[in-house]
Amino acid sequence: MSDFIVEVVGMLDVNCYLVPVAESRRLYIIDPGGDTDAVVAAAKKFTYDEAIILLTHAHIDHISAVRDVAKALGVSKVYLHKDDVSLYESPDNNLLPYIPTAEDLPEITDTIPGNDFEIIETPGHSPGGVCYYFKQIPAIFVGDTIFNNSVGRSDLPGGNHEQLIGSIKSKLMPLPDDLKLYPGHGPASTVGSEKKFNPYL
């Protein structure tokens, strides 16, 4: 397992993670939310046979560069939970005037072959929010579900605060205390640290 790269992209400083898995010769690009050139340049630092885009959820700041990154790297698979596909395809998914609606997005796939990671469903920030648990690293990429001493917003369309807290407590907090949590914005944390210090939990 090689080290992964984080590129901070777009106007809202989204953490886009590029995670190589040597065994499957795949490169996973998690949440390419902007700055296509930087993401593509980072991808070129790895040797791989296939690049796959994984989306933790479909808010515009996490998907803005999906089309261009997919085109540049020959990506044929973009994974997103089915409950966020309507948001992914919505003409209203934007932050005008700053971030326009993403157009001509590639189609979503609902399955990824192999067992490079586990998908953990954590709805609440959005209906189809998920986390990607790469046990070999080990690391879990949690999108906007949980942050360092904070949690994701639930006041956006489709958000639900009680559901979000329930997801975190039932799905993430039982994981090992030393497991690193890599969020969609801001610095990394660990499960143990969030148990102790996160005021929302």
Image (cartoon, grey):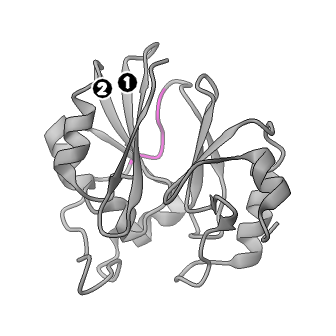
Tag 1 secondary structure? strand
Vertical order, 119 against 130 (above or below): above
Give the label on residue 50, or none: 2
Q: Are marks 1 and 2 in contact (CB under 8 Å)?
A: yes
Q: Secondary structure at mark 2?
A: strand
Q: Report the residue at 30% width, 26% height from top.
A: 50
Give 178 or 60, whichever is nearer the viewer: 178
- The residue where tag 1 is placed is 26
Work out whether residue 114 or residue 181 is closer to the camera in this orientation and state it: 181
Which residue is pictured at 33% across the width and 58% down the height? 33
Residue type at mark 1: give it.
Arg
Seen at 30% across and 53% down, the residue is 107
**Crowding at mark 2 (Cα within 10 Å: few <14, some 14-19, many 20+):** some
Question: Across the whole image, how many numbered discs are drawn on residues?
Answer: 2
In the image, is 68 to the left or to the right of 152? left
Picture coordinates of residue 65, whole percent (x, y): 25, 56
When asked about the image quadrant of residue 20, the answer is: top left
> Does label 1 or label 2 sit earlier along the sequence?
1
Residue, x 28% and y 18% (percent of image)?
47
Would you place residue 169 above or below residue 124 in this image?
A: above
Please tell me whether residue 130 is drawn above or below residue 154 in the rendered image: above
Q: Taking 147 as reference, is 53 left or right?
A: left
- Pointer 1 local density, CA inside 10 Å: few below 14, some 14–19, many at least 20: some
- Stretch in magenta: 109-113
Q: Quadrant of the C terminus?
A: bottom right
Magenta span includes 186: no
Q: Main secondary structure of the magenta part?
A: loop
Q: Residue furthest top?
A: 23
Q: Could you tell me how far apart the alpha carbons at marks 1 and 2 are, in whole angstroms?
A: 5 Å
What's the residue type where badge 2 is placed? Answer: Glu
82 or 20, nearer to the observer: 20
Q: Position of residue 10 (x, y in %)?
A: 29, 63
